Image (tube, rainbow, N blue to C red):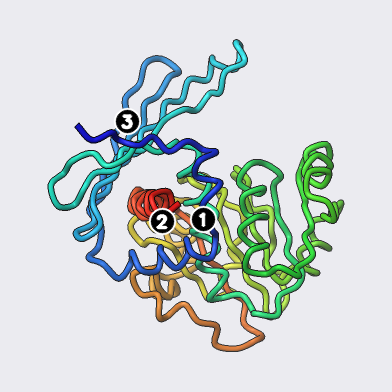
Amino acid sequence: MTNIPFISFADGEAVLDWLALTDALAAGHRLPKAEIGDTFLYRDADTLLSRAAWIDGMGIAVKSATIFPGNADSGKPAINGGVNLYSDADGTLEAIIDFHLVTKWKTAGDSLLAARRLARTESREILLVGGGNVAASLYEAYKAAFPTAQFTIWSRTPETAKRFADQKPGTRIAHDLETAVGMADIIGTATMSTAPLIKGDWLRPGQHLDLIGAYRPDMREVDDTALTRARIFVDSFDTTLGHIGEIKIPLESGAIDREDIVADYYDLERFTRQSDDEITICKNGGGAHLDLMTSRFILGRYQAA
């Protein structure tokens, strides 16, 4: 019987590359559209979330996450899980991949794909809003595509911003969000805010925003003015329009229309900047199909190494 590889976080980190991942995500969106499905199981405060995707020509992935909030009391991670990757040809299990590895590279790679197409190539000032794990991943991803950029971090909690800057030498700490937004060429948001943090009146021509943090119907990171001043893109219509407050709320209020959302990644040729002055926004909604594309990329790099 063939041994099924388990790809740990460390194993994956050793062989992966951000720019190559975005190329793989672009290639994945040239295949037939994914079939996706999510399931939730609950026991009191504990949750099992399973997200499945099947892409004809690529295979099947089932990403399962266990969320046990009480683990913190015993010093254990609250979120654990793994990704099972199956063959498209015969459905056999090909690999089991660490949940955190797939999530990290999928999430930041998703937004980097948009930034490589929509941000101005001469972008030199990058602002990260939120100082957690996603912001740290974004730092790595953006640095791969914009190696000479200066990074600034803003967080509601000064201690979080300082810790981030200490871990990423050369990163500046912003004490005033409005001023930091005005200076940035690229803005990556990774918060769980339910009220818009970034005001459209703060934006200036030529900026690109990657909105990542809001994932629930009641969450938003930018206001209506920001959306009406920008050309809007999403990674997936299916996972954003009716599900995430960033897009769902302004659509329902009439602040924006469905036609204002230019394209998703299944229409990547439309992810282009029309002028140096326009403002662009891409909403990162994630989705199991991106977990599948990322997992297939991880397995390929692991086997090649």
Amino acid, disc 3: Phe
Disc 1 or disc 3, which is closer to the eye? 3
Q: What residue lies at 16% left-to-right and 44% top-to-bottom?
A: 91
Lower sequence index among marks 2 and 1: 2
Disc 1, SS: helix
Which residue, given by chain and number where applicable, does mark 3 sit on? 40
In this view, the residue in front, 41 or 102, is 102
Which residue, given by chain and number where applicable, does mark 1 sit on? 246
Q: Would residue 287 be visible to someone looking at this image? A: no
Q: What residue lies at 53% left-to-right and 23% top-to-bottom?
A: 78
In this view, the residue in front, 177 or 32, is 32
Q: What residue lies at 85% left-to-right and 52% top-to-bottom?
A: 173
Where is residue 209? Give x, y as percent.
Answer: 62, 66
Residue 205's tag is: none
**From mark 2 to mark 1, how far is it between C-alphas?**
8 Å
Q: What residue lies at 28% left-to-right and 33% top-to-bottom?
A: 3
Q: On the image, which quarter does residue 194 sit in?
A: top right
Lower sequence index among marks 2 and 3: 3
Labels 2 & 1 near each other (Cβ < 8 A): yes
Which residue, given by chain and number where applicable, does mark 2 sit on? 240
Whether residue 280 is situated above or below residue 81 in the rendered picture: below
Q: Would residue 189 be visible to someone looking at this image? A: yes
Labels 2 & 3 near each other (Cβ < 8 A): no
Disc 3, SS: strand
**From mark 2 to mark 3, how far is it between C-alphas?**
19 Å
